[in-house]
Amino acid sequence: MKDIENVGKLIGICICSLFILIPEIHQGLEFGIFGLILITIGIPHGAIDHLITNNKSSSKKFLHFLFNYLGMIILYIIFWIITPKLAFIIFIIMSSYHFGQTHFFEEIITYRSWLKFILSGAYFLALILFGNFQETREIIAPIFDLSINKESQIFILTILAVIYLLFQFSMRPIFPTRKIIEFLLLSFCLYNSPLLISFIVYFGFWHALPSMKIEYEYLSKSLNIKKITTFIKLLIPFSIISLVGIGMVLVFGMKYFETEKLIFIFFILVSLISFPHIIYMDRFLRNTNQN
């Protein structure tokens, strides 16, 4: 799985490079790549939360898990309806935490880790959002009229980058050259790529794929899984359910909304399934890293 993760990151850099070098690429290819990574890596990485929570659960415990999972989604839907601005802010904070956590998988999680995760994840999210700020503004326009000048954006990115690197240096006596090169390449690619490509490359190859590696290692021990194909089969059922649900809403939305609003609706849908996933994944990582 480690080789798969490295290959995935290399593919991600190549995809970003393609769009940076040839900016006039048809938007259809952008949507196609986005959808392919989302379907094959993005959605599946959260499709086995029930197994990493309790892989030997009974039907009763599974129903209890399902009830809690759906309850969290419904609760977040209510937040989006009642106070969309707060719901959006929560989504950004919890996404920053979740993404940042990926960069410190090997570290034991303590009660102070939340700040490290949020600030680290915020750096990469800021790269994605500031790199295509006009597009970002248009997408979130239904709830926010966001206005941040270029100088302020660069200042925020610089501060977050320094904080992230300090956190990384604190983990090891010597920061590997490979990590520095990866950091610089990733930062450049995320900032200069189209918004959807920037997001899906980071989400798919720097978050979802490393997460799946951790999940596979855990289930290979707890469920004695020896083949990647067996692991993939476990991902399929809930991946299909999630994709069908999102797909139905988007197909319906295509009739009534412009592209920017449709993208915003998509991210709301992602936030709904992300909310319980982040909670269960955090619990899983805390238990795994403590043992």
Image (spheres, rainbow, N blue to C red):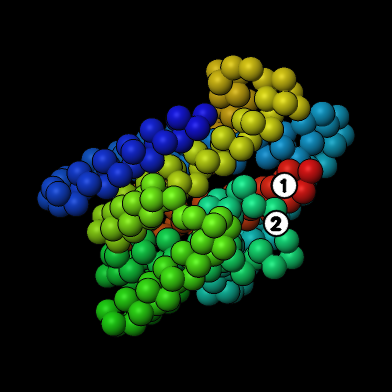
For the residues labelled 1 and 2, the Cα–Cα distance comes to 7 Å
Report helix, strand or loop for mark 2: loop
243 on left or right of 148? right
Observer-nearest of 47 and 224: 224
Q: Which residue is mark 1?
A: 289
| Sequence-wise first label, 1 or 2 | 2
Q: What amino acid is at disc 2? A: Ile
Which residue is pictured at 64% across the width and 52% down the height?
A: 107
Q: Position of residue 36 (x, y in %)?
A: 37, 35
**Secondary-structure class at tag 1:** helix
Q: Are marks 1 and 2 in contact (CB under 8 Å)?
A: yes
Q: Position of residue 113 (x, y in %)?
A: 66, 64
Placement of 239 over or under 266, stated as above or below: above
Report the residue marked by disc 2: 109
**Location of residue 226 with respect to 164 vertically, above or below:** above
Neighbourhood count class around disc 1 (C-alpha, 10 Å): few under 14, some 14–19, many 20 upward: few
Residue positioned 28% across, 58% down in the render: 188
Label 2 Cα neighbours within 10 Å, binned few <14 / some 14-19 / many ≥20? some
Query: What residue do we see at 57% from left, 41% from top?
Result: 211
Residue 234 image-quadrant placement: top right
Residue 125 in the image: state x and y as whole percent: 43, 62
Is residue 229 visible in the rendered structure shown here?
A: yes
Residue 80 visible in image: no
User: Where does residue 181 sit, x and y in percent of width and height?
Assistant: 34, 51
Residue at horizontal 64 percent and vertical 31 percent from the top:
217
